[in-house]
Amino acid sequence: NSVLWFMGDDIPHVPNKRGGGLCLGGKIAPIFFNTMEDAGALPIEVDVSNLNMGDVIDVYPYKGEVRNHETGELLATFELKTDVLIDEVRAGGRIPLIIGRGLTTKAREALGLPHSDVFRQAKDVAESDRGFSLAQKMVGRACGVKGIRPGAYCEPKMTSVGSQDTTGPMTRDELKDLACLGFSADLVMQSFCHTAAYPKPVDVNTHHTLPDFIMNRGGVSLRPG
């Protein structure tokens, strides 16, 4: 959030929040990489040893190049983690892209039209004769296949979702951003396992307000105590 606040773009009619921008790093941890994707930013893993504080650079996502703005010198080359990143940036984030792509697919199916070729597709991971780990089998089962290889793109069907209390208010804000009026998963459960025993004043407020928010959208909320 701090990085996005510094280099992101203002979102029209949405106060105290920013999106977009570029993030370059030698290695970006998966949790932060995913956060950047959701915010519509373009995370790029690239060798930054030739970059210095105060440099003005030009980044060419399609060419995979970083150049000095004044001299045109090639400072580094890179490859995007997946071609779908470009679509995510254009859509304003990974979640809007997934929702829009799903809506497009359902609309075209209802109209009897073929699959859309507007969206970029992730490259298939090379086949392997090695078996799958238990985790890969679990994700694969939710996708209707035997297993999912590392690096493969998939959208598993979620039938049950658990939300815990320390991140509950943040989850509530994110659901409001998505204009969520009802859950599509069969079971959405909100717990208060972390703050029920020794609640702080802010936790007491959460205990009183979060359950109704979850239940009004078809979820199940456990009562603290």
Image (tube, rainbow, N blue to C red):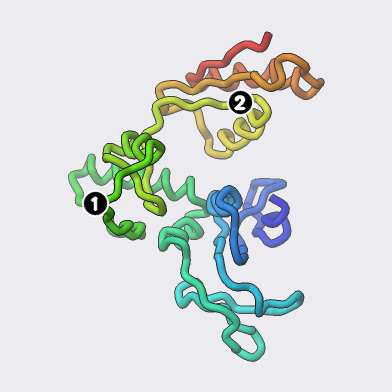
Residue placed under numbered mark 2 in the picture: 164
Residue 21, horizontal then vertical, whole percent: 61, 62
Q: Is residue 153 shown left or right of residue 113?
A: right
Q: In front here: 77 or 3?
A: 77
Q: Residue furthest front?
A: 130
What number is the disc on residue 115?
1
Instruction: Look at the numbered discs 1 and 2 and tell me whether their residues touch, using CB distance below 8 Å.
Output: no
Question: Circle 2: is it few (<14), some (14-19), or many (20+) Cα within 10 Å?
Answer: some
Q: In front here: 2 or 81?
A: 81
The residue sitting at 44% across, 25% down in the picture is: 160
What number is the disc on residue 176?
none
Element type where label 2 sits in the image:
loop
Q: Looking at the figure, which quarter contains the C terminus? A: top right
Q: Pick whichever of labels 1 and 2 is earlier in the sequence.
A: 1
Q: Is residue 224 shown left or right of residue 159?
A: right
Between marks 1 and 2 in the image, the one whose residue lies nearer the viewer: 2
Q: Residue furthest left?
A: 112
- Vertical relation: 177 (above or below) 216: below
Q: Residue furthest right?
A: 201
Residue 220, horizontal then vertical, whole percent: 52, 16
The residue sitting at 70% across, 15% down in the picture is: 196
Q: Evaluate whether residue 22 shows in this view.
A: no
- Vertical relation: 127 (above or below) 100: below
Question: Circle 1: is it few (<14), some (14-19), or many (20+) Cα within 10 Å?
Answer: few
Q: Amino acid at mark 2?
A: Gln
Element type where label 1 sits in the image:
loop
- Vertical relation: 54 (above or below) 182: below
Quadrant for residue 4, please give it: bottom right
- Vertical relation: 212 (above or below) 146: above
Residue 80, horizontal then vertical, whole percent: 47, 66
